[in-house]
Structures are given as C-alpha cells and as structure tokens.
Image: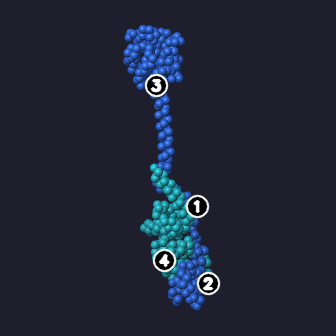
Amino acid sequence: MVDQTHKQHGDSSSLHHFEEVFMPHLDAAYNLARWLLRHEQNAEDAVQEAFLRAFKAFPRFRGGEGKPWLMTIVRNVCYTTIKKLRHQDLLEPFDEVVHQSANSLATSELHQQMANAETLHRALEKLAPEHREIIVLHDLEGLSYKEIATVTAIPIGTVMSRLARARGRLRQEIIALNAKESQP
Amino acid sequence: MNCSELSQKLDPYLDGELDLTASLALEEHLASCPACRQLRDQQQNLITLTEEELPRFQAPFFLKTRIRASLRAEEPRPAMNTWWRFWPATWVYAGAFALVVITLFLFFWLKPSTSLFQEVIADHIRSLQVNHLMDVASTDQHTVKPWFVGKLTYSPTVIDLSNSGYPLIGGRLDVLRHQEVSAIVYQRRKHYINLFIYPSDPTILKDQFYQNEGYHVFIWSRSGMNYAAVSELNEKELREFVSLIQAQTN
C-alpha cells in the first residue's frame, strides 16, 4: 500500500510535470502540424494524439529540451496522418514545380516579388512536406540544426543541405506564383 | 573558399550554424566576390521574409483544454491510483464503522440481555410488592385480551392454561426496555408468573434461561413477539409453563 501511495504521488506529479514541460510548446506543436497537414481539424487531432503519445512515452523522457522531443512526436503523428489521408485521396496531390534558377533574378526584383505575405504562405504550402517542415522548424520555431536533426532523424549535414534546398524551392515557388499572377 | 563552396555553406552561415573558422573563410571570400555578396543578400532577404512574414499558427484556445482532459481520461493509472489514495481512509472508516456495530451489538444484544433478566425480575418483584399485580383481574382470556386494546399498539396473545394448572388471573401494563409492555399474570399454587409480551422489533431474543436469587426467567421470541416469563416458581414447573405457552403461540 505504501508503494501504491508513492506511485500515485509519482503519477499525479508526473502529469503535472509533463504539462509543465510540454504545454508551453502547444503552439509550436500546432504550428508544425498545421503547416504539415494544411488543415485545422486534422492539425488539432494530430496535436492531441501527439500529446497523448508523449505522455505515454514520458517516462523515457530524459529531461533537457522538451520542444524537440515533442516536435518529433508531432511530426511522426502528422506523417501517419498524411499517409492515411493520401490513402483516402483527401490530400491534394502535391505538384512539385521546377522552374528557372532564382539566381537569375536581381535582388531588388526578388524582394519586390516576395513582398506579398500571402504569396509566401502559398509558396510554402506548395513545398514537399520535408521541405515545408524544415523551414517551419527552423525559421518559424527557431530550432537549431542539431535539434532538427533529432526531430527528423537525419544527420546534421543533411539538415544543412535540405534547408538550403528547401529555401531554393521556396524561392522558385514564389517566382512561379508571381509569374502566374502577373499574367493577364 | 570558392563560389561553389560558399553556396553550400551560405545557409548555415546565415543561420549562425557555421563554425568560426569556416565563417571567417566565407567572409573573406565575400569581401572579394560581388556575385556572392548578391547571393548572400538574396538569401538573407528570403530568410528574413520567412521569419517575419510567414504566419505562425496558434493553437485554438480550446485545444489545450481538450488535451488536458484527454490526458486525464485516457491515462488509466491516475484514476486507479485515486482509488488507492482513498484506501487508507476507507479502511479507517470501515474500522470505525465495525467498531460502532460491535459496540451496538454488545450494548443492545449482549448487555441488555443480561440486564433484561434483571429488569424482568425487578418488574416481577415490584408487581408483587406494591400490590399492583393486575390492572385487569380476570380469569377470562376474552376479558384480559381486549383490555389491552387501545393501551398498546399491539395485541398480545392471551392464553388460558387453567386446564394445565396455570390459571390466568389477570393482566397489566408494565415497562420493559423503556417501553410499555403487556404483562399477563398466571398463578401456580401460591406463586405468580409474569409473562411479558412485546414486539421483538428491534431486538429478537434467543431462547435463554436465567436464574438469580430464587427467581427464574425464560426469554424467547416467537412470531415477531418477545416473551419473558418470570417467577419464583421452581425451574421445572416454569419450564413446563413456557413449553405450554410456546406450544400455543407457534
């Protein structure tokens, strides 16, 4: 009975501890899920599922930064959802566009073209999930290369090159969208 | 560092992820290469734009509540442990309850039984001393029985045992266990027998015999009524009397 009492205390405080560590990252988790799934309801469900999984796995959490640990789980849940949705044909087919090199554009011209936040938004949505997520994780959520390597389970060198490639793709999408708009 | 190397290391450089040595080499190249400076500016602009212009979605306010609820609902351990937390208190309450039950049992069953005998004897003695043996003096059971009507909430069975040598001589009201009870009086030679009859709720009596200072008491319960027969008559005859009463009340 003494053991049970201790266990009880451990559990209730572990739920408390869990929420203390991970609730502050709720927005980050939702942001990643929302960008990956591009759907509000699906993102909410994925985040809830991720929190439940995280709590079940909490005994294996070795402390330290909670954010990458949680983002790893959110990401896994999202990819499971994406697979499921693809299966159901509910997700728009991803069309990866390869356009002309961004380097051919002048800085001022690019900046002018990029000034539209909505275009930027749409451009990011068009990227492949692995490119989208790396930009979200780094530029929006401020995760370091090392943390991203943990979350995505890829070597840090790959993080480096993938992020550069993702930005290149983003630039191409922006240009393509602007070109489409400028057409009569 | 050449232009190709720079393009590979530009992103980590702008993200502050490039080590110091490589950063210095990169900056050295930038200083001497206008094309790479332009590339750097383009990339910096893009990064600034994504950081500043892209929306960072915020979780809807209800999501936190939903998650907290699901954490508590889906995890079975906290619920089970809540049980365990209350176990010690439950045991304390159970223990206290058992103690009260045992005390009540002792108070209303064992101890009262002992004092019931004494009370029965005391009633019997008093009934003889104050010459108040009978409120209704009659050898007719059809006179004695109706006499109790309106005086008690129950109607005692009045049996005439004249043929067996225990003539009915009357009845009265008495007090036993803090309640008014019917006392039926019988005679055996010069001895009187008080037969107390009252409802057995709440206490059912076991068949018991008690004797003290020449008085004999039999108590028993039949058909929802408690009986106590008391007399200074010898045990054998009183027992016979009790058997006769029991035979007619079963």
Labels 2 and 1 within one chain:
no
- Counting from the top left corner in percent of width and height, residue A20 is at 55, 61
The amino acid at mark 4 is: Ile
- Image coordinates of residue A113 in percent, x first then y, are 60, 80
Task: Look at discs 2 and 1 and give the one toward the viewer.
Answer: 1
Which hue is chain A drawn in?
A: cyan
Q: Disc 1 versus disc 4: distance between alpha carbons?
A: 35 Å
Q: Looking at the image, is mark 1 or mark 3 nearer the viewer?
A: 3
Q: Secondary structure at mark 4?
A: helix
Q: Residue A139, located in which quarter of the rendered image?
A: bottom right
Q: Amino acid at mark 3?
A: Ser
Q: Residue A15's spot in the image, x, y percent? A: 51, 58
Q: Are marks 4 and 2 on the same chain?
A: yes
For the residues tagged 1 and 3, is the chain the same? yes
Q: Which mark is residue A69?
A: none
* Residue bearing the label numbered 4: A156
What residue does disc 2 label?
A108
**Chain rendered blue:** B
Q: Which residue is mark 1?
A: B61
Residue position for label 3:
B113
Report, in whole angstroms, how far the alpha carbon at label 3 lies from the one at label 2. Answer: 109 Å
What amino acid type should be assigned to the residue bearing mark 1? Answer: Phe
Q: Amino acid at mark 2?
A: Ser
Most foreground residue, B99 or A18 = B99
Q: Is residue B28 above or below residue A5?
A: below
